[in-house]
Image (cartoon, rainbow, N blue to C red):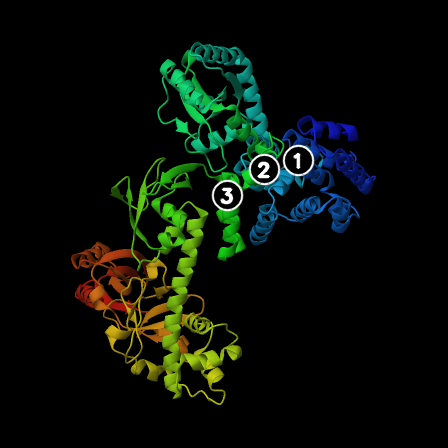
Amino acid sequence: MMRQYELVERVKRYNPQADEALLNKAYIYAMQAHGSQKRASGDPFFAHPLEVAAILTDLRLDDATIIAAVLHDTIEDTEATLEEITRLFNPEIGALVDGLTKIKRLDLVSKRAAQGENFRKLLLAIAEDVRVLLVKLADRLHNMRTLGFMPEAKRPRIAEETLEIYAPLAGRMGMQELREELEELAFQHLRPEAWQTISKRLEDVSQKNERLVEEIERILGSLLAAKGLTAQVHGRRKRPYSIWKKMESKSVAFEQLSDIFGFRIIVDEIDDCYRALGVVHTTWPMVPGRYKDYVSTPKQNDYRSLHTTVVGPGKQRVELQIRTRQMDEIAEYGIAAHALYKEGADIARFVAESRAYQWLRRTIDLLAEGDNPEEFLEHTKLELFHDQVFCFTPKGRLIALPRGATPIDFAYAVHTDVGNTAVGCKINGRMAPLLTELANGDEVEIVRATTQTPPAAWESLVRTGKARAAIRRATRTAVRKQYAGLGSQILERAFERAGKAFSNEKIAAALPRLARGSIEDVMAAVGRGEMFSGDVVRAVYPDYTDERRSAASLRETADGEAPSEESFVKIQIPHGPEDEYAIPIRGLDGDLPIRFAPEGGAVPGDRIVGIITPGEGITIYPIQSGALAAFDNEPDRWVDVRWDVEAIATQRFPARIQLQSINEPGSLAQIAQAIADHDGNIDNLAMKRRTPDFTDIQINLSVWDLKHLNGIIAELRAKRIIAKVDRVTG
C-alpha cells in the first residue's frame, strides 16, 4: 500500500506547488474513515482509493482531483458526510466527491430502460466537471485489475459494463492507453478462452519476429535521420482484444492477419510529420486505401496523427502512425494531457474548447429533446462505438459522422429541421441517392422541401443515434396527427348522432373530466380506439343519454369512406364533399396502421367497412364478411370507407376461393391453367380429399379487383371437373 509521503512525492514530481498539507490531511482522513474495512482480495480497503490516486498522478492531474480520488469512497462506504468533506477541505473537492458518489450508485447493466436512465445520470454527473469522469475511469481501471478476486458470478456483469460504457467513454475522451487496458481486462473475463488462445499466438509471433521489429525500427530511424529528421521509432505488438475484434469483423483467421505489429514515429513539428510520410512512401509502396490524415482533420476526441500502411522489408505489411510529441501525449492521455500544471495551461479553458468535451456537451444536450431512456442509451452507444468519416457542407463546415453514414445522417447532423425536410442530395456537386454511403472528404448539399416528412423506413437505414431519434419523433408526431384527424371525424359523427353541438371549445372545457391534457390528446385517444366517443359526448354533456343506432342501420346509411394500407382508400367525414374532406393515407409508410382482414380480405369493387381495433388501427373488411357480426354491438368502432379507385393502378389484392373438384388425373393442372389464363396469381393452395370422387381445394389468389376475381370464378365454374366454386370472405 502506498505510504503518505509517497503520494505527496508523486504529486510534487510534476507539480512542485502542490498543497502538501491538504494531501496529507486527505490521506489521514480517508485512512481513519475506512478503518479496518477489507476488499474482496483481503487487502485493506484504503489501498483502493490510493491506487486510484496513483493512476491519476500518472496523468499529472491537479490537487483537487487527486484528493477527490483519495476520498471518493468515503461517503458511500463510511460514516463521512458531504457536508463534513466540504467543510474540512473545500467546496470544489466536495462537489467532485459528491459526483463520484452519485455515479457509484448507478447500475449500468440493469434492464435496458433503467440502464438508459442511469446512463443519463452518469453523463449529467460528469457534464459539469470532466474530472469526475477521470476519477471514475481510474476507479474502474483498478477494479478491473482486481476483478479476479470478485465472486465469479459478478465478473461478467462488471466486465460487460466496462466494455459497453467505460472503455468507449475513455476512448471518446481520447485516453487510448486507458481504454485499451479496460478493453483487454474486460475481454479477459468475458471471453477467457479466446483471450488465452490469442495471447499465446501473439507471444509465439513476437518471439519469431523480435529481430524483424528491431530491424524495421533501425531502418526507419536511419532513413529519417538521413533526411535530417529527428525522430523516435517504436514498434509494438497489438493487444489481444484488438486482434479479436479484427478477426470477428473481417471473418478471418489469425494466420490471415498481416498487421499484428504497429510502429509509431514521433517527430518534433507538424511539418516533420508530412516530411516523414514522404520518406516512407518514397521508400516502400503504400497499401491503397490505408492512408488517413487525422492531422488536418482531427477526430472528435482531439486525436491527431497520420496513418499509413506500407509493404516494408521482407514483403511485410507495416502499419505506421506519424505524430508529434504533443499529439502522442494527447493520443495516450486524451483530455487529461492538458493538466493544469503544464506550463501554466488553463485546463478549464482547454476542456471547454476540446472536441472531446464538445461531444460530451452535445450528448448532454440530447437530454433536453425528450427521448426516452432506451433511445438515449441507443444514441449514445452508437456515438461511442463507431469510427468516423469527415464530410463538409457547401460552406466548408466540417461534419463528423460514423463510418457507413448516409446523407440522411449528414442532414440531421446539420440540424433536425434539415433532416426532416430532406428530399435529395448532391455529393461533390452531383445528384446522388439519400442512401449513398459517405466517404471522407465528401461535400454534401441537402435538397429540401418544406412539405416533406421523414419516412418511418429511414429509421432502420440511418447510422447516427441523433437521426434515428429525430425520425422516431417525426413519425410519432405524424401518426398522432393522423389519429387525431380520425378521432375528430369520429367525434363529429358521434355528436351529430347525439344531436349535440360539437366544438373544440366544448372539448377543452371537459378536459379535466376526460383526464387528458389537450384537445389533441382526446382526438388521438378516440382515433386509436383508447377512448369511446360516447364517453366524450357525456363528458361535454353530462345529462346526455346514449341512444345508439343499430349496426345494420349504420351500414345501410354508410356514405363516407376510409383508406387502406397503400393509399387505396380515403377517410372522409360522412356526407361531406369528397375533395374537401378526403384524407389520403399511406399505411405502408407507417403513417397510420391500416390493414385488410387476414381471412378473406376485400378487393376493389367490394363494398367495404373499417373496424377500429384499440392500439392496432383500422382493419378493412368486405361488407359481406361474417366476421363483422362480432362488432354489431359496437357501432363506434365502425368507420365508413370507400375505394379510391383512381389510385388503384398496379396493385394486386389477396382473395380466397373454395372449390370442389372431381378426382381425375390433370384436374389440378386444369384449375391452375384457368387461373393463369385470366391473369390470376396463386399464392397458396391447400387440398383435402372429401370423398373418393371429390376433393376440397382452397386457393389464395392475387387479383386486380372484384371484376377480375368474378371472371376467374366464372371460368372455373364452366369447367367440367369443377362441382362448386365459392368466394371465402371470412
Q: Are marks 2 and 1 in contact (CB under 8 Å)?
A: yes
Q: Amino acid at mark 1?
A: Asp
In the figure, 273 relative to 176: above or below?
Answer: above
Q: Which mark is residue 62?
A: 1
Kindly state the secondary structure of the residue where label 1 is placed: loop
In the figure, 629 relative to 708: above or below?
Answer: below
In the rendering, at what x and y percent does residue 675 appear? Answer: 20, 59
Label 1 packing within 10 angstroms: few (<14), some (14-19), many (20+): many
> Which mark is first along the chain, 3 or 1?
1
Q: Which residue is mark 2?
A: 347
Q: CA distance from mark 2 to mark 1?
A: 10 Å
Left or right of 252, for residue 107: right
> Which mark is first along the chain, 3 or 2?
2
Q: Locate residue 484: give its quadrant.
A: bottom left
Kindly state the secondary structure of the residue where label 3 is placed: helix
In the rendering, at what x and y percent does residue 272 appear? Answer: 44, 20
In the figure, 565 relative to 511: above or below?
Answer: above
Can residue 414 be seen here? The reply is yes
Left or right of 388, for residue 428: left
In the rendering, at what x and y percent does residue 650 appear? Answer: 21, 59
At 38% across and 15% down in the image, what residue appears? 284
Q: How many marks?
A: 3
Kindly state the secondary structure of the residue where label 2 is placed: helix
Q: Amino acid at mark 2?
A: Ile
Q: Are marks 2 and 3 in contact (CB under 8 Å)?
A: no
Q: Amino acid at mark 3?
A: Gln
Q: Which residue is mark 3?
A: 358
Can residue 187 be seen here? The reply is no
Q: Are marks 1 and 3 in contact (CB under 8 Å)?
A: no
The mark closer to the camera, 2 or 3, is 2
At 46% across and 89% down in the image, what residue appears? 545
Label 3 packing within 10 angstroms: few (<14), some (14-19), many (20+): some
